[in-house]
Image (cartoon, rainbow, N blue to C red):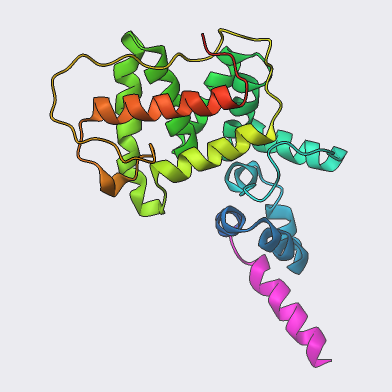
Amino acid sequence: MSTGIRKTSRHEFFKNFPKDLLTEVLARVASASISDLFTAKLSCKEFLEAASENYIFEHITIEKLPVIPWTTSHGASSFLARCKENGNPEALFRQGMVEFFSSNRPESGFQHLKNAARKGHVEAIYTCGVILVCHGGQFKQEGIELLSSLKNYKSRHCSIKECRDKIKEILQSMWIDRREAGIGPQEPKSHGRTCNCSKFNKRGWIDEEEYTTCDYCVWDHEATLFCKILRARGFGIS
């Protein structure tokens, strides 16, 4: 009987919570762990109902799900589709990567990447910025400003190398359309400015604490590294 009393009390406790508050709590849980969200859904009817809100799908983490699953159930496909429909940054980023680098839909893919970047998705900011720098001309300054904004995200324990490593891992997991030569970004040319920048380390990678250089040199070099990763995967670079 005591067990029944405890269950009833817990149910009544959450029943009196405003639905908006329950949704916000669940969104925070979902942003940290998808398994914890499903555990919460099983705990009471109120959490189960709140978990179906679009706001949850916008914020839920899908980091542990494969970018390119070999097999996908109808339920998993519906789940990921709803994440994209509700502007989940990681889902938008993944869709953008697939469309831009694999499905020969660069315009649509870049738009998805931009939408994810606007929501503060670090890897999307990096990818958009590098693409713009590579394309040069009027886009280069925009790309440099976008990449330079990554300095504001150091508090999230991210780094340029971590962005690059994650993107490299994603590119290695997907099929690259080798026939589409010329749709990719070009390696950037020298910015033509006179500067006293330090040389990059012998490994060729940028570690934020190892250089003293201008933004133009930093991001030209980073874009060149990015293009080398693409070339290694067979992506067409004219």
Q: Which of 112 and 221 is in front in this view?
A: 221
Residue at 42% x, 49% y: name it. 158
Q: Can residue 78 be seen in this view?
A: yes
Residue 42 picture location, percent across and down: 77, 65
Residue with the most extreme bottom position = 2
Residue 37 picture location, percent across and down: 68, 59
| 169 drawn magenta | no
Residue at 31% x, 35% y: name it. 149
Residue 184 picture location, percent across and down: 53, 14
Q: Nearer the viewer, residue 234 or 60?
A: 234
| 8 drawn magenta | yes
Q: What stretch is highlighted in magenta?
A: 1-18
32 on left or right of 70? left
28 on left or right of 67? left
Residue 9 picture location, percent across and down: 71, 80
223 on left or right of 69? left
23 in relation to 181, above or below: below
Residue at 43% x, 32% y: name it. 125
Residue at 29% x, 18% y: name it. 141
Q: Is residue 114 visible?
A: no
173 in relation to 145, above or below: below
